[in-house]
Amino acid sequence: MGANDPWQTLISRVLAGERRSIARLLSRLDDRAPGFEVAARLLAEHAGRAHVVGITGVPGAGKSTLVNALLGAWLAQGRKVAVIAVDPSSPIHGGAVLGDRVRMGEHGAHPNAYIRSFSARGALGGLSHATRAAADCLDAAGFDKVLVETVGAGQSETDIMALADTRVVVCPPGLGDEVQAIKAGILEIADLLVITKSDLPHADATVRDLKDMLALRRRFGQRDWNTRVMPVHAPASKGIDELVAAIEEHRSVRGCGTRLNGNAPSSADESRTTPPDAAADDWLNRLQALAARDGPCVTLGFEVIEGGAGSATVTVTLDDRHINFFGSCHGGIVFALADSAFGLASNSYGPIAAAIDAHIAFSSAAGKGDRLVARAVELRRGRTLAVYRVDVHKMRDDGGEEIVSTFTGTVFIRGSKSDAAAETKSG
């Protein structure tokens, strides 16, 4: 981007804190205006100072009310606070009610607050496609805290894991039987488990069930932080001060900028199963060997061209095998390409990971003769779960790239270091 590029001009104004420019930039990122990918990368270069706090949980758990209470508490401390609220999109017209802003109206006019709603636009995983870039934008604009409220989430909507520095999972009283409480998924990603509506009769039982869940579950990479269960009653500000203190304590332990750290483990215990300084050829050879044993990769003509710790790049040139009855690339081929990159990246340490969740969104079509490139990167890796993102691009004749789809996936790590080492030696 040149100095006179509209994106660059807008970003410069955002860095100066101009609220109207922030609004315009967020809208353009949400609309995926031409050049948005480059703009997102530029914003990321200026981000990393703000503390991103993710608020997630089932629909109706009281997330927006809790966000409003946290917003008020931090504003009272003199902090600059931004809120990104993701609302579900209508399956009929694609829009959203954007009702989360109604519950935060009392702080909307505060000079240190900025509240922005996004429609999920069909994206799965709990976030919208623009959430990451929006967080970077507000971070770069000088906000101290960026609160990200996900759309009402189930057990598999865990994209917030890779975005937030501190992850707050909101649980209403009466979750159901004890088996429901110990299921893996969204509860497992929590740094803080917050029981909302603690004035209701079943609140104490829910607190007890979740504490039992944490006691039963093995500790994976949690030596520097133990997940806490905290009851709150946000409308009466009960428990809010304690929650704010716990969030600040977590920030002091884990720091900020999680989403910008790429493949960095989030704690010393979350070490890798293969040395990070292994030669690039070793990684590539390992992944190519895995791909050669994968039937879809071989049948569909996929080729692994790059590989690393938790990363893989897979490419294909589209031919008659890949074209549907409309004359364009079959969506299943794009998914298979992205899924192959995802599977190879997640098993780059040895085949010890099993996919448990995957979501794909399509942006543009491709046709016969086009070359597609799927790049998978590891966003976060713990002892039990790892999250990956895959971007599928179409290579243009001018050397540029056009986004075709975005893919996110979560794997359960079912093996160990010794399993990976043995598999590597035997392969």
Image (tube, rainbow, N blue to C red):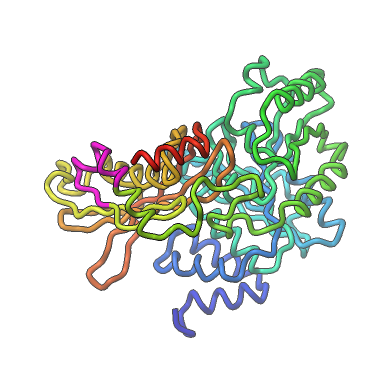
Task: Point out the image quarter for the N terminus.
Answer: bottom left
Position of 385 with respect to 331 (left or right) is right
Task: Point out the image quarter for the C terminus.
Answer: top left
Residue drawn where x is 74% and y is 25% of the image: 215
Q: Nearer the viewer, residue 174 or 158?
A: 158
Position of 176 with respect to 272 (left or right) is right
Q: Is residue 160 above or below residue 257?
A: above
User: How far across and down, in percent of the image, does residue 333 sit?
Assistant: 25, 43
Q: What is the magenta segment's predominant secondary structure?
A: helix
Question: Does residue 300 show up magenta in the picture?
Answer: yes
User: How far across and down, in percent of the image, does residue 297 sit?
Assistant: 25, 43
Residue drawn where x is 67% and y is 54% of the image: 52
Quadrant of the image occupied by residue 330: top left
User: How far across and down, in percent of the image, does residue 251 sit?
Assistant: 75, 53
Q: Nearer the viewer, residue 265 or 42?
A: 265
Q: Nearer the viewer, residue 191 or 267?
A: 267
Residue drawn where x is 67% and y is 27% of the image: 217
Question: Does residue 215 show up magenta in the picture?
Answer: no
Position of 71 with respect to 140 (left or right) is right
Looking at this rendering, what residue extends furthest in the left direction?
Answer: 320
Q: Is residue 183 above or below residue 277?
A: above
Looking at this rendering, what residue extends furthest in the top direction?
Answer: 177
Q: Is residue 216 above or below residue 265?
A: above
Q: Is residue 220 above or below residue 404?
A: above
Task: Write the start and end of the magenta stretch as one range.
Answer: 289-303
Number of numbered callouts drawn: 0
Residue drawn where x is 67% and y is 38% of the image: 190
